[in-house]
Amino acid sequence: MVSFNISSLYTNIPLNETIEIILKYLYDENTPRPSMDRKDFKKLLEFTTKNSHFLFDGKMYDQIDGVSMGSPLSPLPAEIFLQGFEKKHLELFDLMGIGYWKRYVDDTFVLLDPKADPDDVCNRLSLCHPSIKFTVDKENLESNSIPFLDALV
């Protein structure tokens, strides 16, 4: 058992890619299509996600990429991006020795093939996308347990 965590998830979500995932689903894969024009919907998505400002140490900053921490909108693009990431790389998971993968936001509970090296799998996952970096927590072999989402599994 291992747990993979995505470092600084919200601030590393690639917005352009996430917006394209949303548009592809809504306008290419979904029926019926939204009544709003694709270009207009894209502008709306860009406006609501890319125009993020925050105050730090008394100075105003613009967020270049990613979604804002604390914004009520942030979890949605993060979840959409990660579902796209998982769908795209699902076949690689098997090749890496991942037998079971369940995710809650940025934490995953994973069962690995005993022959798979958790650190190697973590490094390979991190290579799947330049914006996403994983860390790994390994099972305590003495107690055969791992902390996951404030519970001991």
Image (cartoon, helix red, strand yellow):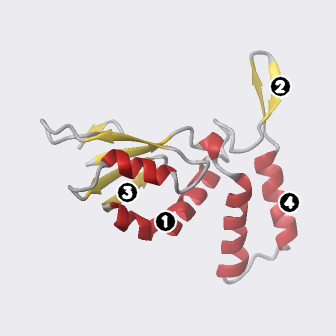
**Residue 142 place in picture, x, y as percent:** 12, 35
Q: Mark 3 or 2 closer to N-term?
A: 2
Q: Mark 1 or 2 closer to N-term?
A: 2
Badge 4 element: helix
Residue type beneath disc 3? Lys
Indicate left or right for 79 with 95 as reference. right
Rendered image: mark on residue 43? 4
Disc 3/disc 4 C-alpha distance (Å):
33 Å
Badge 1 element: helix
- Asked whether the viewer can see residue 71, the reply is yes
Q: Mark 4 or 1 closer to N-term?
A: 4
Q: Mark 4 against mark 1, which lies toward the viewer? A: 1
**Residue 153 place in picture, x, y as percent:** 23, 44
Residue type beneath disc 2? Met
Q: Mark 3 or 1 closer to N-term?
A: 1
Q: Nearer the viewer, residue 115 or 43?
A: 115
The residue furthest top is 58
Q: Label 3 neighbourhood size at 10 Å, few (<14), some (14-19), many (20+)?
A: few
Rendered image: mark on residue 102? 3
